[in-house]
């Protein structure tokens, strides 16, 4: 990233999105590379254990996990 601050849109609950994708253009004009960031808690207070906010951590795999619903079958090995 080049140090710019990008605006993050909040959802209806007031939380930022769980996953954030940033397209980075390819130098040769090819398809852009997409960097994937996951929202994680920034930390917790010592006294009450309250969450201090959010931060985004880079996910090197570049793939979002598929949602797992309780009524779906477990994945086959």
Image (cartoon, helix red, strand yellow):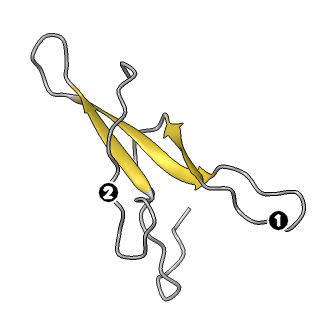
77 in relation to 54, above or below: below
What mark, if any, has residue 9 been given in the picture? Answer: 2
Quadrant location of residue 51? bottom right
Residue with the most extreme top position: 28
Q: In the displayed structure, does residue 61 sit left or right of residue 48?
A: left
The quadrant of the rendering that contains the N terminus is: top left
Which callout, 1 or 2, points at the residue further toward the start of the chain?
Answer: 2
Alpha-carbon span between mark 1 and mark 2: 27 Å
**Numbered marks: total:** 2
Q: Nearer the viewer, residue 74 or 22?
A: 22
Q: Nearer the viewer, residue 53 or 25?
A: 53
Quadrant location of residue 33? top left
59 in relation to 13, above or below: above
Where residue 74 appears, x then y in whole percent? 54, 75
Residue plotted at (45% across, 43% down): 37
Residue plotted at (14% across, 27% down): 31
Residue plotted at (35% across, 26% down): 4
Q: In the displayed structure, does residue 6 sit left or right of residue 32?
A: right
Q: Is there any visible trace of residue 64 in the rendered image? A: no
Which residue, given by chain and number where applicable, does mark 1 sit on? 49
């Amino acid at each position: 990233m080049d140090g710019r601050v990008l605006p993050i849109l909040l959802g209806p609950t007031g939380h930022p999105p769980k996953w954030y994708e940033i397209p980075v253009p390819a130098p040769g004009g090819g398809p852009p590379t997409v960097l994937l960031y996951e929202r994680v808690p920034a930390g917790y207070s010592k006294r009450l254990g309250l969450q201090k906010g959010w931060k985004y951590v880079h996910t090197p795999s570049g793939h979002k996990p598929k949602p797992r619903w309780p009524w779906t079958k477990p994945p086959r090995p």
